Structure formats: structure tokens, C-alpha cells
Image: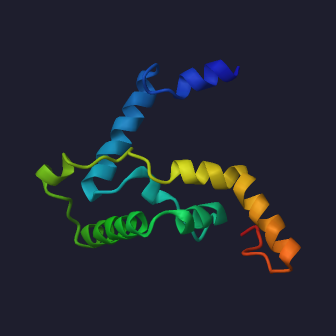
């Protein structure tokens, strides 16, 4: 069952998944965004923690892309065609850190260390 689901979602094996990926890529290129820019740190605390652990330059570039996309959207415009061709919407910068944070290995060790030292936890998980 897992093999079928994995092959169904793989754009290399399924033409519908490839069409969807191409459509998402086209929309992201129009505004100069990457797929990882769509994650909301206010909704998911793991994303917030992963962004806090990334280098400052990466976070600044993300914020610039989001500001540019918002500006273009409000003006009802797209990036110029030559800039759209330069965009790389599926180059990931957040997935590795998000996997590390979501697995909880590093975060659990840090939380245990904080508790041993008597410090307050960084954040409490709440269901919105």
C-alpha cells in the first residue's frame, strides 16, 4: 500500500502529479517564491523553531521574497519573464532543518537540558 501511494505522488512516475508540480512551479515563479516560503511560522511552531535555527541570510532572503510577492500581488503584476526563468521554486532551504526539528531529537535534548537547569520551556504547543 505504501509503495502504491509513494509511486502515485511521485511526479516522475505519475503524469497527474507532474502536471500539478508544473502548475505549482509556474505560480511560484510568477511571484518569485519558493515552496518553503509558503510555510507559516505563526501556525506551526516547528516551522518557527526551524526558521530560528537557520542562518540570518537565509531568513532575510525569505522575507525579501515574501515582501516582493506581496507587493506584486497587490499591484496585480508578475515578475518580468527573464526573472521568472531564473527562479528555483523547489530548491529547499527549510526541509532539512524542519525534519530535524520535527523529529524532536535536538529539541527534546535541549528541552531536557533546560528543565535540568531549571529554565522555562521556549514554547508550549497549543492547538489553534
The residue that appears at 40% across and 29% down in the rendered structure is 18
In the displayed structure, 95 sits above or below 14; it is: below
Residue 106 location (% of width, % of height): 71, 56
Quadrant of residue 8 in the image? Answer: top right
The quadrant the N terminus occupies is top right
- 64 and 76: which one is in front? 64
The location of residue 30, given as percent across then percent down, is 25, 54
Can residue 44 be seen here? The reply is yes
Q: Looking at the image, which residue is at 68% across and 53% down?
A: 102
Q: Which residue is found at the position 20% from the left and 48% from the top? A: 86
Query: In this view, which residue lies farthest toward the bottom?
Result: 119
Q: Name the image quarter holding residue 74.
A: bottom left
Task: Report the coloring of the rendering.
Answer: rainbow
- In the image, residue 36 sits, relative to residue 64, either above or below, namely above
**The C terminus is located in which quarter?**
bottom right
Foreground pick, 49 / 66: 49
Left or right, 122 with respect to 59, comes to right
Q: Decide: is 82 above or below 45.
A: above
**Image point 64% across, 61% down: which residue?**
46
Amino acid at each position: 500500500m505504501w509503495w502504491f501511494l509513494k509511486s502515485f505522488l511521485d511526479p516522475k512516475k505519475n503524469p497527474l502529479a507532474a502536471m500539478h508540480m508544473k502548475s505549482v512551479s509556474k505560480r511560484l515563479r510568477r511571484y518569485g517564491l519558493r515552496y518553503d516560503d509558503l510555510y507559516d511560522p505563526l501556525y506551526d511552531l516547528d516551522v518557527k523553531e526551524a526558521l530560528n535555527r537557520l542562518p540570518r541570510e537565509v531568513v532575510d532572503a525569505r522575507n525579501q521574497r515574501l515582501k516582493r510577492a506581496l507587493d506584486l500581488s497587490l499591484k496585480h503584476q508578475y515578475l518580468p519573464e527573464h526573472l521568472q526563468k531564473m527562479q528555483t521554486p523547489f530548491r529547499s532551504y527549510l526541509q532539512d532543518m524542519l525534519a530535524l526539528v520535527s523529529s524532536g531529537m535536538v529539541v527534546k535534548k535541549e528541552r531536557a537540558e533546560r528543565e535540568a537547569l531549571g529554565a522555562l520551556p521556549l514554547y508550549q504547543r497549543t492547538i489553534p
